[in-house]
Image (cartoon, grey):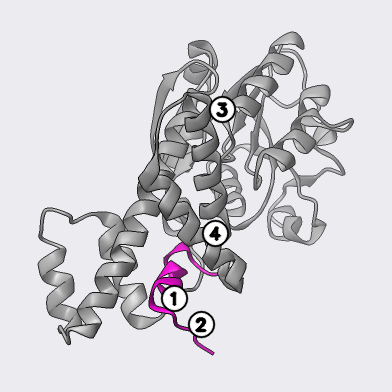
């Protein structure tokens, strides 16, 4: 039986790990908060005390943590996954990181005879639950090919974008577009309400227009209903926009629209909205307080 180490059992990771377990993979899991391992342990997963212990002897490792700092800790720390991985282990990192940290970890993994794929995902909780995630991958073709059974167990598509860092790059572009569209939808909802438009009519018409998208159809109703239960936290979107701007600066490319959108999300995060869904940027736009 193929052994998979899984590192990071947050809202997304717990669902991805559960899908791997249901697909028949033997799981060894690590999470900083051990309580989050309980549900998987009750179904047979082994619980490890560190990332290094989790990956020891594993064929694959999957990680999804919050940012570059967390990735550096779980991958390159003294008890990190890279140090503990056996030769030939394939590490699939689904965290949303900068291309720079992805390439750094890839170099370390290669030096130890392992493979590292930066493989962030498109999709939120619903897609993670339903195995509908889209993996955007950077790294060696050989490792990407061997990892196909894992991608198939967790998502509906995996596409290799290029060498190490390419997956992270595409992901940051994706989230810049997502954040920009969310901010635009927030302005649209504000104007629709001020003009007295009927919600159902606005949703149906805009949902069939040129700007129609899955994001519009999912986030606009949430804004109308003031339902900001997190599917993807605003603080994480703001972080991703910050990473995108840093990448653009390194590439010497102007990104005035993304900079403006990031400032809106930054203000929302600083206004204590970071734990809500990203569409709570609407509250910042409309000058409203979160619903009680």
Query: Where in the figure is residue 4, as x and y percent of width and height?
Result: 66, 33
Label 3 sits on residue: 99
Q: Secondary structure at mark 1?
A: helix
Q: Which region is colored magenta?
A: 276-292
Q: Is residue 145 visible?
A: yes
Marks 1/2 in contact by CB < 8 Å: the verdict is: yes
**172 over 181 or under it: above or below:** above
The picture places residue 45, in percent across and down from the top left corner, at 72, 47
Sequence-first disc among 2 and 4: 4
The first of marks 2 and 3 along the sequence is 3
First-in-chain label (1 vs 2): 1
The picture places residue 157, in percent across and down from the top left corner, at 37, 35
State the CA–CA distance, disc 1 to disc 3. Answer: 32 Å
Residue highlighted by disc 4:
266
Whole-number angstrom distance, CA of label 2 to CA of label 3? 34 Å
Q: Are marks 1 and 3 in contact (CB under 8 Å)?
A: no
Element on which disc 2 rests: loop
Residue topped by disc 2: 290
Q: CA distance from mark 1 to mark 2?
A: 7 Å
Q: Mark 1 highlights which residue?
A: 283
Is 180 part of what is drawn in magenta?
A: no
């Amino acid at each position: 039986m193929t052994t998979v180490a899984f590192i990071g059992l947050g809202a997304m990771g717990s669902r991805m790990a559960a899908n791997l377990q249901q697909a028949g993979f033997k799981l060894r899991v690590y999470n900083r908060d051990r309580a989050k391992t309980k549900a998987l342990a009750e179904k047979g997963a082994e619980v490890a005390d560190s990332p290094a212990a989790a990956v020891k002897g594993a064929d694959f490792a999957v990680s999804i943590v919050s940012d570059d700092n967390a990735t550096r800790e779980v991958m390159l720390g003294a008890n990190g996954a890279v140090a503990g991985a056996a030769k030939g282990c394939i590490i699939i990192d689904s965290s949303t990181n900068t291309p720079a940290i992805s390439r750094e970890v890839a170099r370390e993994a290669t030096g130890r005879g392992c493979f590292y794929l930066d493989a962030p995902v498109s999709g939120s909780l619903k897609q993670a639950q339903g195995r509908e995630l889209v993996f955007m991958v950077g790294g060696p073709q050989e490792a990407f090919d061997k990892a196909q059974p894992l991608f198939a167990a967790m998502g509906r598509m995996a596409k290799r974008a290029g060498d190490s860092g390419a997956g992270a790059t595409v992901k940051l572009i994706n989230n810049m577009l997502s954040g920009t569209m969310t901010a635009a939808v927030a302005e649209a909802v504000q104007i629709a309400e001020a003009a007295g438009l009927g919600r159902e009519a606005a949703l149906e018409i805009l949902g069939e227009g040129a700007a129609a998208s899955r994001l519009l159809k999912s986030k606009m109703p949430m804004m109308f209903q003031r339902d900001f239960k997190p599917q993807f936290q605003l603080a994480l979107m703001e972080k991703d926009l910050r990473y995108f701007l840093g990448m653009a600066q390194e590439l010497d490319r102007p990104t005035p629209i993304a900079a403006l959108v990031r400032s809106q999300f930054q203000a929302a995060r600083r206004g204590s909205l970071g734990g809500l869904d990203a569409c709570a940027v609407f509250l910042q736009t409309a000058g409203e307080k979160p619903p009680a």
